[in-house]
Image: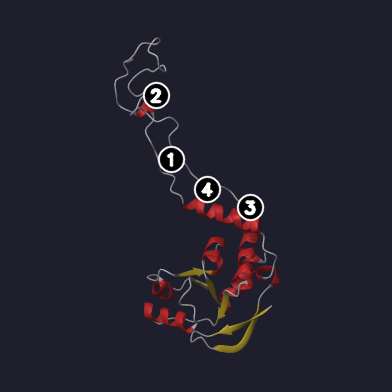
Amino acid sequence: MEVSVFNIKGEDTGRKVTLSENVFGIEPNDHAIYLDVKQYLAAQRQGTAKSKERSEMSGSTRKLGRQKGGGGARRGDINSPVLVGGARVFGPRPRNYSFKLNKKVKALARRSALSYKLQENALMVIEDFNLETPKTKSFIEIVNNLKISDKKVLMVLPGANKNVYLSARNLQRAKVAIASDINTYGVLNAGVMVVTESAVAQIESVLNK
């Protein structure tokens, strides 16, 4: 399938780039997307929640009441979970929420997300460009020229570009990513995805393996 190539002034260059059917034109697999997004969000969790349990609380270990005949549940010291203000039972402990996902499933999820973006006409291809100096105003000008200033923008570059990254860093609704590092969550979370010509080739080389 062919997509028009624009320049950073928002003008159609008259050229077209052919996108791989195996990457941008598959039948999306919603379950693979669900698993990949779930794994991504799980990996973002700190997992540092912790509450003191009975053995970690300070307080006398003296048995407060008699074993039987009190008319209530049996209890030992003042840290008993039965009492108000007592210890918590099975409270949260530090843990790692991340889990394993097969590489093929992750690749299928990314191809599915890219296919959704193309189906929704939310994917634009632009000429390779570079900014001479890091300037937020320059990045905003590009976004305005492409008429996507009202949407969340994910700009995908073929490699690290410090000037473009720094120019977009202060913008809440814009994110810059490297072609080899794009993930399913980032693609789906963007309202529109702007990919440079070189980045298209890189994405296809990674996901066509």
Report how far apart the C-alphas of labels 3 and 4 lie in the structure.
13 Å
Q: What is the basis of the colouring in this image?
A: secondary structure
Amino acid residing under circle 2: Val
Element assignment for label 3: loop
Report how far apart the C-alphas of labels 1 and 3 lie in the structure.
25 Å
198 versus 90 height, above or below: below
Q: Residues within 10 Å of mark 1 (few under 14, many from 20)?
A: few
Q: Earlier in the sequence, mark 2 or mark 4?
A: 2
Q: Earlier in the sequence, mark 2 or mark 3?
A: 2
Q: Which residue is mark 4?
A: 98
Give whichever of 191, 82 is nearer the camera.
82
Mark closer to the observer (1, 3): 1
Element assignment for label 1: loop
Q: Which residue is mark 2?
A: 82
Locate residue 95, reporting x and y percent. Answer: 47, 41
Report how far apart the C-alphas of labels 2 and 1 lie in the structure.
24 Å
Q: Residues within 10 Å of mark 3 (few under 14, many from 20)?
A: few
Report how far apart the C-alphas of labels 2 and 3 lie in the structure.
45 Å
Amino acid residing under circle 4: Ser
Q: The N terminus lies in which quarter of the figure?
A: bottom right
Indicate left or right for 30 with 140 as reference.
right
Amino acid residing under circle 3: Asn
Q: Which residue is mark 3?
A: 102
Q: Which residue is mark 1?
A: 94
Q: Earlier in the sequence, mark 1 or mark 3?
A: 1
Question: Tags 4 and 1 in contact by the CB under 8 Å rule?
Answer: no
100 versus 179 height, above or below: above
Indicate left or right for 45 with 22 as reference.
left
Locate residue 12, reporting x and y percent. Answer: 57, 88
